[in-house]
Image: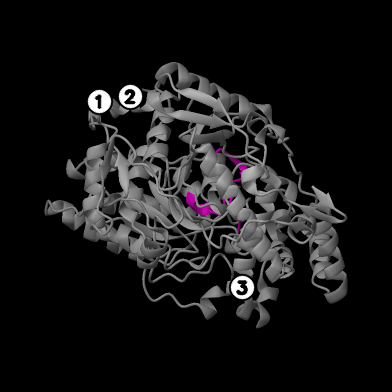
Amino acid sequence: MRMGKKRVMLPVTDVDLTTVKYDPGEIEAPHTTGFWLKLFVKLVEMPLLGYLILGHLKKQNKMNEMLRDTVIPEPPMFRPEFPPQEPEPGVVLLEEDGKSEDQVDSAVRCLPQYDPDSYHSSESSPFRYWKIRDFAYSYRQRLTTPSSVAEHVICLIEEFSHKKPPTPLLISFDPEDVRKQAAASTQRFEEGKPLSILDGIFVAIKDDIDCYPHSSNGATTWLHEVRKVKKDAVSVSRLRSCGAILVGKANMHELGMGTTGVNPNYGTARNPHDLERYTGGSSSGPAAIVASGICSAALGTDGGGSVRIPSSLCGVVGLKTTYGRTDIRGSICDAGTVEIVGPIASSVEDIILVYAAILGSSPSDKISLRPSVPCLPDLSSRENSSILGSLRFGKYTEWFNDVFSPDISNKCEDALNMFSETHGCQVLEIVIPELDEMRTAHVVSIGSEAATSLSPDLQDGKGGRLTLDSRINFALFSSFSASDYVAAQRLRRRLMYYHMEIFKNVDVIVTPTTGMTAPIIPKSALKLGESNMKVTGNLMRFIIAANLLGLPAISVPVGYDKQGLPIGLQIIGRPWGEATILRLAAAFEGLRVETKQPASYFDILKRN
């Protein structure tokens, strides 16, 4: 309700959900590339004129109305706070402080029995990626070695780096280091002592996660000058202890502040399904290197869909864990309240194996967040089918159907219907209020935290060395006040309440992962970048709740649009409910009948 110019929100407990009307809340901002992008950056960085331009944009998008002209009665929630959760059924419990190798071994026992004969596909069989257990079987049977596979991986990565224009999957890569890791793994197999199922598996690491001896630039040209890497990030160290071969630092949208993956600094990674299109971002390189078949898995970070968006656009699987479930120490964004480190892989099975290796909260998060005991779904159990049938899906239909192309909502709807027919589960209609406020609260949270962490360097002149779209973003972020940030955290508490109330009646929320499939890369964007908030809004439409509220979410492929571009379904779970969304994702994957080999795909294992 309004009192003069002031808007007063009802206490969240008094909101009548039957009166809520869906508001798509379209983003209003100019689309600029090339000369016009350069000009726009100059204008927004001018002291007075920039203030006026940014003020106009914030007014157009109702940001000031939501943050400064509204009385929000709830106290702020400065990081996710979760109520106690019921245990998940049909799971295998893991030790919070257990060794990564032991956790991975437990994960293997959760999977259906491996039958190598069933994986010998004929020419007429649907396309499928080689899985981690296929590589492990080949190594153990001495059909090939990690060193042999490494030579093909190195050759392909160098080939991508030398293309014109450059389309690098990795932006820091040392072939001799890869050969050294592969030789050590080969030796362990010769001695019959592999460290885990991940031994000899090739994994890429996003450029904002430390992987010694590589620098972490966050795809800038300068961050290594002010931030030295002295050891692996915690998640990378855990993978290394399992024998994974870390191939280098994967390309990304600069500092994670974009959803397309465009990168004028090093070259823009291309979507393996259509090389004229974006991968999505910001984990562009990780998704592309997995989708192209060169690596079995990759680590990304997800502060605004940066694992799930590129996974959906590239036709692979991406897991965003509960905030605090994985230890984010050693990443550039390790001081934020919306980011996590999560895996990208070509199958849910491989996601489970990599997730098992990296899970485990930091000591401080164990105290403040009180995480439930980590667990994995027992997919080999006889109970699995009955558990699937008992789960309830929440679907906000008006939101679900608010997509750029009806192909997306239709394919996701088809997948839901097929799942219900197969397993007999319920799909319940839900309503989620204040979605536009959620988007505003998220951009203020992630933007203010990013600007604060980089402020000394930006003030020291490094800001002028950022890409043009990053400079626009940081000009906007720097315009947010302390009161804006506190107001955003008040909204966070309201939105957490709505979602926890929804989860009293459903087990998961289902949406398309993105509101559009992979956008075309404008030629003018390759050299100078691009600012297109309309595309950003479409790509992030369903993404934000998992980041702002810290909820687990997974993107799983469910088909293609009429242009042959991948479509992802997103499953959002309760806090600490990774086992449930992994179980469901595996079941959706099992139903999928439509699979296509990407246009740019390399059969690494068959070559050996």
**Which residue carries the number 1 mark?**
382
Q: Are marks 2 and 1 in contact (CB under 8 Å)?
A: yes
- Hey, which quadrant is residue 188 in on the image? bottom left
- The magenta span reads 267-286
Residue 595, percent from left and from top? 47, 28
Residue 276, percent from left and from top? 64, 43
**Which residue carries the number 3 mark?**
452
Mark-to-mark CA distance, 1 and 3: 51 Å
Which secondary structure lies at badge 1? loop
- Is tag 1's residue or tag 3's residue first in the polypeptide sequence? 1
Mark-to-mark CA distance, 3 and 2: 48 Å
Foreground of the two, 324 or 402: 324
> Farthest bottom residue?
460
Residue 272 appears in view: no
**Which residue carries the number 2 mark?**
385
Left or right: 363 in relation to 192 = right
Residue 552, percent from left and from top? 46, 46
Q: Amino acid at mark 1?
A: Arg
Where the C terminus falls, by quadrant?
A: top left
Q: Amino acid at mark 3?
A: Thr
Answer few, some or many: residues within 10 Å of disc 1's Cα (few below 14, many 20 plus, some between 14 and 19): few
